[in-house]
Amino acid sequence: MALKLRWKDESEDEKKAELVEHLAELRTRIMRSCLYVGAGMIVAWIFYYRIHDFLAGPIDHALSQMRSEHPGGGIANTFVFQHFTDGFFMFLQIVMIGGLIIALPFVLYEAWAFIRPGLTVSERKAASFVFPLSIVLFACGLSVAYLILPMAIHWFLSFVPTDTILLQNPLTYIVFVVKLMLVFGLLFQLPVVLMFLGKIGVINSALMKKYWRQIAVGLFTLAMVAAPSNDPGTMLALAIPLTILFFGSIWLVQMVEPKDKDKD
């Protein structure tokens, strides 16, 4: 009996020591991630004006297009701050968002390094493919959003009378741009989500092939709801890539889904 109690005490001590070790590692990786974000914010601070001009590019391009369509008229844009602190908060927003985006690959690596020891060999192989794919898809989503921004802004400007001075709040504009880009970046993670669902057996490639029409309609509906600008061009620009990504995901799900012999 004494031996059993002693063995139980040693087992509990080992579990506690292992838990403390994991928590210490988690704290270390969180601190590293915070340092990465801080370094990213410093980089964004250094290149603040370039980032500002980059974010202002879509509205400048849309306004220039409006002026070319209406020679001698068009819409003049002036960024207007409504409070003397707005300039600081715009600077803070751009630096924070820029820092997070710059640090994202490093933060994801820390997350991967933390969970990697607890995965099986097959899970490690799948995850080592998923993490780079997720980063690439996120970057593609941001790029597509930035490319269609001038079209979305132009659509809204088409309802503004010509020979008008647009007093645009830059804070509102930046929030709109960032929101649109984040929506595209997150929704472009569709293949990663479908691969995960296929891996755990919730869906399979045969089911996706069978109901592709209904899923395509659902993706177009999702694009209508998720697009922050609510204009037809942005909705189509989001829905079409999502549909293409879905069809590509059928092949990816087929790679990771449990085979019949595994189920047996």
Image: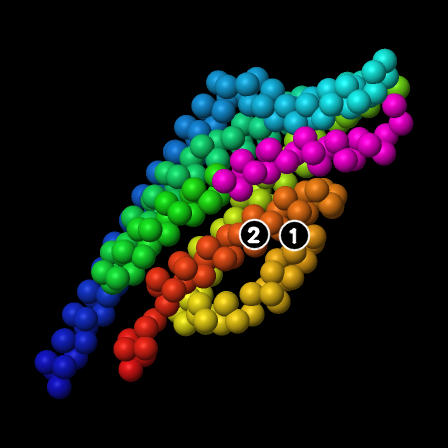
Disc 1 marks which residue?
223
The 10 Å Cα crowd at callout 2, few under 14, some 14 to 19, many 20 or more, is many
Q: Nearer the viewer, residue 237 or 29?
A: 237
Is 169 on the left or on the right of 264, as rendered? right
Q: Amino acid at mark 1?
A: Ala
Is 153 on the left or on the right of 262, as rendered? right
Residue drawn at (48%, 43%) of the image: 138
Element type at mark 2: helix
Q: Position of residue 48 (x, y in %)?
A: 54, 20
- The answer to whether 77 is drawn above or below residue 25 in the figure is above
Disc 2 marks which residue?
242
Residue 83 appears in view = no
Is 66 on the left or on the right of 101, as rendered? right
Q: What's drawn in magenta, residue-wise?
A: 140-162
How far apart marks 2 and 1 lie (CA) works out to 8 Å
Q: Main secondary structure of the magenta part?
A: helix
Q: Amino acid at mark 2?
A: Leu
Please tell me how many numbered marks the rendered image carries: 2
Q: Position of residue 127 (x, y in %)?
A: 33, 54
Q: Nearer the viewer, residue 47 or 203?
A: 203
Residue drawn at (69%, 34%) of the image: 151
Q: Position of residue 258 (x, y in %)?
A: 34, 71
